[in-house]
Image (cartoon, grey):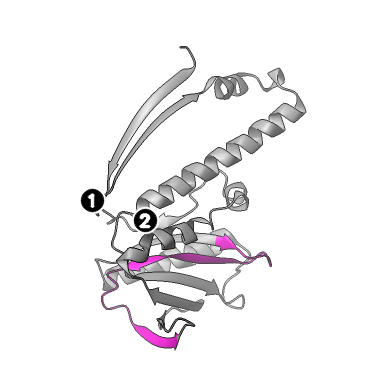
Amino acid sequence: MEGYKRNLSIKIFPNGQVSIIYNFCCDLITRKIKNDKSLFNEEELKDIERKNINDSLMRTKKKIFDLSKCAEWDYMLTITFNPELVDSYDLQCVSKKLREWLKRQKIKSPDLQYLVIPEMHKSGRWHFHGFLSNIGDIPIDFYKKDKNGRMVFHLSKFPYGFNTIISINRDELDKCVNYISKYITKELCQVEKGKKRYFHSNNLG
């Protein structure tokens, strides 16, 4: 049928899990709007934009879920930025600082794996959540025990603000992934329209 497409994806993850997804979708509307927006009234264009944002949101969450299955993570990470050191209202600025810092850590610990996602606080400032594994020689210090008695550490040489890393068990991974995925929001998709909304090391499985 013209304008319709079907596709089947099969993904096998390092932990042995298999994902099989069958998609049946229509790209007629996409083709029409690319050719001539005058075919739609203002309200229809708003509906299409909302749909595009929702579709983008689901694609990003799916990608995060897939990437999270590609490593045996050791820690869950949270990073906030000191506004006196970095403009934490500027996502591109804080992302650049964090990526540069992670690249320096890869030199120290070449096996380092990471997956990091930004979240906008209600104040408008950005911070990050994610996973770390194989941290090697990256220095960490004990910070405290949480309410469940779990050990909380921090990356002692991170220069731009405050952070915590918490050890996670393998059987907690799915729960942690769902927790991390909630930070992929419509606001993030709108702010980062057409841009990458997360970043990760290249050595994921």
Query: Vertical placement of 28 versus 174: above or below?
Result: above
Can you tell which mark lies on residue 178? none
In the displayed structure, does residue 191 sit left or right of residue 157? right
Task: Residue 133: give x, y in percent of width and height.
Answer: 31, 68
Image quadrant assignment for residue 50: top right
The magenta segment is 119-144
Nearest to N terminus: mark 1 or mark 2 = 1
Q: Residues within 10 Å of mark 2 (few under 14, many from 20)?
A: many
Q: Residue at x 65, y 31 (%)?
A: 48
Q: Which residue is mark 1?
A: 16
Query: Does the stretch in magenta take in 125?
Result: yes
Q: How many marks?
A: 2
Calculate the distance from the C-alpha at mark 1 to the C-alpha at mark 2: 13 Å
In the displayed structure, does residue 162 sit left or right of residue 132? right
Residue situated in front as seen by the camera: 140 or 1: 1
Query: Vertical placement of 59 versus 91: above or below?
Result: above
| Secondary structure of residue under mark 2 | helix
In the displayed structure, does residue 186 sit left or right of residue 21? right
Query: Does the stretch in magenta take in 135?
Result: yes
Residue situated in front as seen by the camera: 125 or 151: 151
Q: Amino acid at mark 1?
A: Gly
Can you tell which mark lies on residue 68? 2
Task: Residue 183: give x, y in percent of width and height.
Answer: 54, 58
Residue situated in front as seen by the camera: 157 or 76: 76
Task: Residue 30: give x, y in percent of width and height.
Answer: 56, 25
Q: Residue at x 47, y 60 (%)?
A: 180
Q: Residues within 10 Å of mark 1 (few under 14, many from 20)?
A: few
Task: Residue 185: give x, y in percent of width and height.
Answer: 58, 52
In the displayed structure, does residue 17 sit left or right of residue 140? left
| Secondary structure of residue under mark 1 | loop
Whether residue 194 is visible here, answered yes or no, is: no
